[in-house]
Image: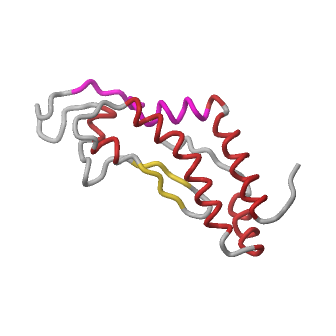
Amino acid sequence: MSDAVKITGLTKFSKGIKEIDDSLPKTLRLALNGVADVVIVAARAKMPSRTGKAKSSIKATSGQDRVKVRAGGRKAPHYPWLDYGGEGRIKGRPTPRPFIKGGRYLYPVYFAKRDSGEFLELMTTALLDVVRAAGIEVD
């Protein structure tokens, strides 16, 4: 699914703040992670849990101009079955779960946050905080 939130000029912004201070791109990356944490916390709250491995597998990965939320992996290979459903790795094991194309946890939370405008508010605040950290006054 490629319904990403795109911010025009973020790469240019990142390069520009690096010219002001070398540590500011890290501040930007941490700010982007903070925005992603809103999705992560809400998705984890909706998920059922036996061992907590699937919940803890939801993480943000980021660069200086992007952030992604990932789930599953080697520690929680059952995550796709839990979120989307299906037959499982071996037919009949684990118990078949009704398939839901959009998922049950991660994407529904992401779309709800994106469509409510919460991302816009959080991103605006995060970018303004980075600009203020650069020593630039903002109204």
Q: Quadrant of residue 105?
A: top left
Q: Left or right: 2 with respect to 83?
A: right
Compared with 109, 12 (above or below) is below
Identify the residue at horizontal 51%, vertical 39% (top origin). 39
* Residue 40 counted in the magenta span: no
Identify the residue at horizontal 73%, vertical 64% (top origin). 12
Q: Compare residues 127 and 97 and report the one nearer the observer.
A: 127
Residue 113 position within the rendered picture, expressed as x and y whole percent measured from the top left:
58, 33
* Residue 107 counted in the magenta span: yes
| Residue projecting furthest to the top | 98
Q: Quadrant of residue 16?
A: bottom right
Residue 129 position within the rendered picture, expressed as x and y whole percent measured from the top left:
73, 54
Residue 20 position within the rendered picture, expressed as x and y whole percent measured from the top left:
77, 73
Identify the residue at horizontal 71%, vertical 72% (top origin). 18
Q: Compare residues 66 and 127 and report the one nearer the observer.
A: 127
Compared with 66, 21 (above or below) is below
Identify the residue at horizontal 68%, vertical 46% (top origin). 123
| Magenta residues, start to end | 97-114
Q: Left or right: 125 with respect to 30?
A: right
**Colouring chosen for the image of the structure:** secondary structure
Count of picture labels: 0
Residue 138 position within the rendered picture, expressed as x and y whole percent measured from the top left:
86, 53
